[in-house]
Amino acid sequence: MSSGRVAVVTGGASGIGRAVCLALARDGARVAVADINTTGAAAVADEVRAAGGAGLAVPMDVTSRPSVAAGVEQVLAAWGQIDLLVNAAGWDRIMPFVDTTEEFWDRVIALNYRGVLATCHVVLPHMIARGTGVVVNIASEAGRAGSSGEAVYSGAKGAVIAFSKALAREVARHGIRVNVVAPGLTDTPLLRQLIDDGHEKLVQAIVRATPLQRLARPEEIADAVVFLASEKASFITGQTLSVGGGLTMV
């Protein structure tokens, strides 16, 4: 990104979102760290500023459109524009589909898919009015190939991929690009929680099935986001970039 562009990163308080915030700041962006975890968002905004960037902590619950709208207004009040939206917020727990509940479905879909709908619905009118913008949605290799024990999550992330393709077609005429980054298993607090919940063997099995034989680092996902947000990707839209060590090759 060129210096001074404004990025909003949901789920920015930890994991992939945090890595994206720091990578964008190093690339010259002003970064709004949007998260329901306000303490974590403030800490990451401090990290951005300590590294010489401009950081703003923004309280945001992506499952609530009013919360999203309030957060976006805060960013616009501070910086007057939004050039990049990165949807990194997400959540899951591993269990057989037959053991899930409707409440679980609702939470997974709300955090991983409806949140993307809400942020795009709020931010895109601003981008359309300016005739420019980039959206990068974080999906998952699970959304491309399916993942045992993550049926609802896989479906939600698959929906993000399909939505992003359709959206890319709709907004291209306004000078807006929409792309997806699909990480494989990544060393994040969410993954460590899944391991603590007793799923280490499943994680190890997926690593063994990955040609590069390791977990991704959050910084590697962030580098893909920075690329897709940059002018180097100016003729790329509607695409899904897997950063999964070769787990899927389609």
Image: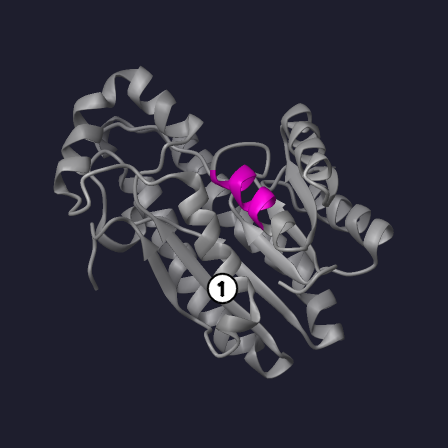
Give the structural element (helix, strand or loop) at label 1. Answer: helix
Q: Residue furthest bottom?
A: 173
Q: Position of residue 75 (x, y in %)?
A: 78, 49
Q: Is residue 230 above or below residue 235?
A: above
Q: Estimate the x, y position of residue 166 in percent, counting from the top left.
A: 45, 71
- Residue under the image location 13 percent in, 42 percent down: 209
**Residue drawn 70% across the image and 77% down it:** 131
Horizontal arrangement in the rendering, residue 162 relative to residue 88 (left or right): left
Residue 147 figure quarter:
top left
For the N terminus, which image quadrant?
A: bottom right
Q: Position of residue 241 (x, y in %)?
A: 36, 61
Q: Which residue appears at 62% of the width and 53% of the height? A: 119
Viewer-proximal residue, 171 or 19?
A: 19
> Is residue 204 magenta-colored?
no
The chief SS type of the magenta part is helix
Give the total of numbered labels: 1
Image height of 73 relative to 60, above or below: below
Q: Which residue is mark 1?
A: 228
Instruction: Give the position of the C terminus as an image quadrant.
Output: bottom left
Local crowd at mark 1 within 10 Å, few (<14), some, or many (≥20)?
many
What residue is drawn where x is 63% and y is 26%? 40
Colouring convention used in this rendered image of the protein: one colour
Where residue 238 sits: x, y (%)? 43, 71
Q: Classify 231 as above or below 115.
A: below
Q: Amino acid at mark 1?
A: Leu
Q: Which residues are magenta?
A: 16-23
For the view shown, which residue lies furthest in the right direction? 77
